[in-house]
Image (cartoon, helix red, strand yellow):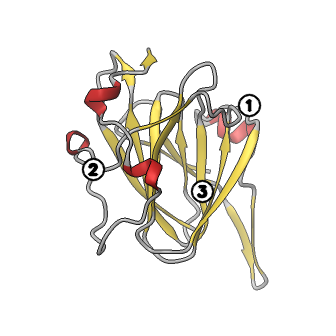
């Protein structure tokens, strides 16, 4: 497995090895021993999958508060995304900073987003599907968000005619309004 440590502590990209021949390929998308050695530990309690039909669809930036805070292991199963994680850990040297990584089905990289980060993505091609494992189940009472285009975040989203997003994602608070919801 290839491992890339990103510029913000805790964020990790991994690329599990694919075994291929003329029929196609096989990959272990989750291997507890290998992923744990790379710094990605569950336990995972739920698998999620989403389809975004329109290029430029933005989903996020989402997080859940404790005691339902989630770590997420994200991968693309069809298409391509710009995946973004924003550090929301109180007292962190990188609080308010983000990392953006392109993930696609062809390359097979996965992004680990630990507890303490807001997460979101933008689809770069139509009919994009992502799958992600989470360390806590969805909890509406703990569900929160961060405005995807908050100027304070300086995220360089792809330039399309206009982002396609839910009403909820378009009304999320800014970083200044939410503060630091995760104690370090």
Percent across and percent down for residue 42 are 70, 32
Query: Distance of mark 1 from mark 3, alpha carbons?
Result: 17 Å
Kindly give the residue lying farthest to the bottom in the view shown: 22
For residue 183, the mark is: none
Q: Are marks 2 and 3 in contact (CB under 8 Å)?
A: no
Disc 2, SS: loop
Q: Residues within 10 Å of mark 1 (few under 14, many from 20)?
A: few
Res. 151 in view: yes
Q: Nearer the viewer, residue 11 or 141?
A: 141
Query: Distance of mark 2 from mark 3, alpha carbons?
Result: 20 Å
Identity of the residue drawn at 37% across and 34% down: 8
Identity of the residue drawn at 31% across and 65% down: 158
Percent across and percent down for residue 76 are 59, 62
Would you identify the image quadrant in which residue 160 lies? Answer: bottom left
Tell me the residue that label 3 is attached to: 75
Tell me the residue that label 1 is attached to: 43
Q: Are marks 1 and 2 in contact (CB under 8 Å)?
A: no
Q: Is residue 24 left or right of residue 76?
A: right
Q: Nearer the viewer, residue 52 or 106?
A: 52
Sequence-wise, the earlier of marks 1 and 2 is: 1
Would you identify the image quadrant in which residue 137 lies? Answer: top right
Q: Residues within 10 Å of mark 2 (few under 14, many from 20)?
A: some
Identity of the residue drawn at 26% across and 56% down: 156
Tell me the residue that label 2 is attached to: 155
Q: Is residue 10 left or right of residue 129?
A: left
Identity of the residue drawn at 75% across and 41% down: 46
Sequence-wise, the earlier of marks 1 and 3 is: 1
96, above or below 67, in the image: below
Percent across and percent down for residue 99 are 36, 45
Disc 1, SS: loop
Percent across and percent down for residue 163 are 36, 65
Res. 95 in view: no
């Amino acid at each position: 497995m290839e491992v890339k440590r990103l510029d913000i502590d805790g964020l990790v990209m991994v690329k599990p090895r694919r075994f291929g021949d003329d029929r196609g390929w096989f990959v272990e998308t989750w291997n507890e021993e290998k992923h744990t050695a790379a710094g990605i530990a569950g336990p995972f309690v739920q698998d999620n999958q989403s389809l975004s039909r329109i290029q430029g669809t933005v989903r996020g930036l989402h997080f859940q508060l404790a005691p339902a805070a989630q770590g997420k292991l994200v991968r693309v199963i069809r298409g391509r995304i710009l995946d973004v994680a924003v550090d929301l850990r109180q007292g962190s040297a990188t609080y308010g900073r983000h990392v953006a990584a392109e993930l696609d089905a062809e390359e097979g990289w996965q992004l680990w987003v630990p507890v303490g980060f807001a997460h979101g993505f933008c689809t770069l091609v139509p009919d994009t599907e992502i799958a992600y494992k989470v360390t806590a189940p969805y909890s509406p009472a703990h569900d929160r968000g961060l405005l995807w285009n908050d100027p304070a975040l300086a995220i360089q989203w792809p330039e399309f005619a206009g982002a396609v997003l839910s009403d909820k994602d378009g009304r999320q608070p800014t970083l200044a309004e939410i503060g630091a919801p995760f104690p370090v």
